Amino acid sequence: ILLAFDFGRKRIGVAVGQTVTKSARPLTTIAVKNGTPTWQDITSLINKWRPDALIVGMPLNMDGTEQPLTQQARDFKQALQARFALPVYEIDERLTTKDAREQLFAEGGYQALQDGQVDRLAAQLILQNWFAENEF
């Protein structure tokens, strides 16, 4: 089992995936307050799912260069490693939020874009991309 995170300044989308079937599904959204994720919620997810590894999407500019959010996502990745002693992998997450928005809008219009749905689906897309590019 893997957990994937779509890091953001206000919310972090989370998805869970099965390494055997290479399938992923949206799970939840974690609040971020004053730049700090709700670590208690993340700890609860880790304890519940007992993942073998964690995946963090790295926000990059379209040309592949880093942006201000990239370093914050990397800091989040390092905090995950320090807190949970699990392998944490990075993956390029360019366009996952855009793709998630388009998919949700196509399914349910503007109402589908509420309540952190985009963040959870973006995390699922991050994890699906990771499965497509990596063996675990």
Image (cartoon, rainbow, N blue to C red):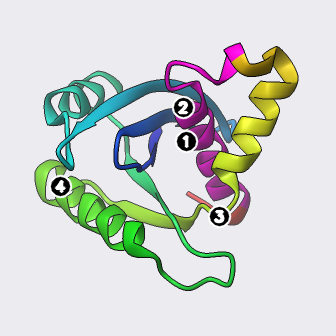
Please indicate whether residue 64 sits to the left or right of residue 88 in the image: right
Q: Under tag 2, what secondary structure?
A: helix
Q: Please report contact status of discs 3 and 2: CB closer than 8 Å, yes or no.
A: no
Identify the residue position indicated by label 4 in the image. Answer: 85
Residue kind at label 4, given as amino acid type: Ala
Q: In the figure, is residue 11 to the left or right of 130?
A: left
- Residue for badge 3: 94
Image position of 73 (left or right of 132): left
> Label 1: few (<14), some or many (≥20) within 10 Å?
many
Q: Residue 95 at what x, y percent from top left?
A: 70, 58
Please state which of the two labelled residues, at mark 3 or mark 1, is closer to the viewer: 3
Q: Residue furthest right?
A: 106
Q: Which residue is mark 1?
A: 123
Residue 52 screen position, x and y as percent: 37, 46
* Residue 120: image tag: 2
Magenta region, residue range: 111-132
- Give the SS element for disc 1: helix
